[in-house]
Amino acid sequence: MTNLAASKTYGTVSAAWQREMSGLEFLLGLVNGTLPLNMIAQALGYDVVEAVKGRVAVAVEPSEAHLNPYGTVHGGLAATLLDSCMRLGVQSTLDKGFGQTTVEFKISLLRPITPETGRIKAEGVVLNCGRRIGTAEGRLTAGSGRCWRIARPRA
């Protein structure tokens, strides 16, 4: 498995440490490697590759380790990437001292992903961020930008 995050470190940033940073400061630390990626990123081999206020992207190179019994990439990989980019997108808008977690999302599977698909990138874009709930939309693309999966908030 090609690991896009091979040069990164892994671990958990404590809640107390996270509260000392704005959401965007935290994310820039993940992107530039000054903060460790979480352990699920290590297990799945993905990396946080872009972060600006209101938009975050994560990427992975699918491999045989990600396959389901039918020989395509397990939908759980796409779900994890989309959950991560949308959640982190909302995190990027938060002030110092605030955190968040996923409430719910729905995924539409548009076409199968295989190791031959190549590098896939999930991009989360914040649609709205209120005092208690943030809403983001995610798209998973490969290669030329063709869309493979979409995640949207449920209305």
Image: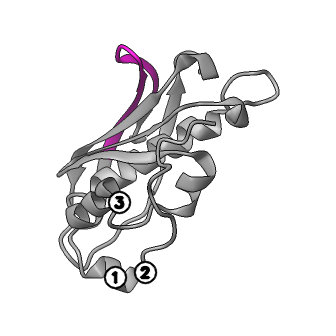
- Measured as percent of width and height from the top left, residue 118 is found at 52, 22
Q: Is residue 106 above or below residue 149?
A: below
| Residue 114 in view of the camera | no
Q: Is residue 47 left or right of residue 129?
A: right
Q: Residue at x 71, y 37 (%)?
A: 65
Q: Is residue 56 left or right of residue 61?
A: left
Separation of marks 1 and 2 at Cα, in angstroms: 5 Å
Residues shaded magenta: 136-150
Separation of marks 3 and 2 at Cα, in angstroms: 16 Å
Neighbourhood count class around disc 1 (C-alpha, 10 Å): few under 14, some 14–19, many 20 upward = few
Q: Nearer the viewer, residue 152 or 140?
A: 140
Q: Is residue 97 above or below residue 129?
A: below
Describe the colour scheme in one phrase: one colour
The kind of secondary structure the magenta stretch mainly shows is strand
Neighbourhood count class around disc 3 (C-alpha, 10 Å): few under 14, some 14–19, many 20 upward = some
| Residue 7 in view of the camera | yes
Mark 2 is on which residue type? Answer: Ser
Question: Which residue in the protein does label 2 denote?
Answer: 14
Mark 3 / mark 2, whichever is N-terminal: 2
Question: Which residue in the protein does label 1 denote?
Answer: 17
Mark 1 is on which residue type? Answer: Trp
Q: Marks 1 and 2: CB-CB under 8 Å? A: yes
- Measured as percent of width and height from the top left, residue 37 is found at 45, 61
At mark 2, the secondary structure is: loop
Give me the disc on residue 33.
3
Separation of marks 1 and 3 at Cα, in angstroms: 16 Å
Neighbourhood count class around disc 2 (C-alpha, 10 Å): few under 14, some 14–19, many 20 upward = few
Q: Please state, as top left, top right, bottom left or bottom right, where the C terminus lies in the image.
A: top left
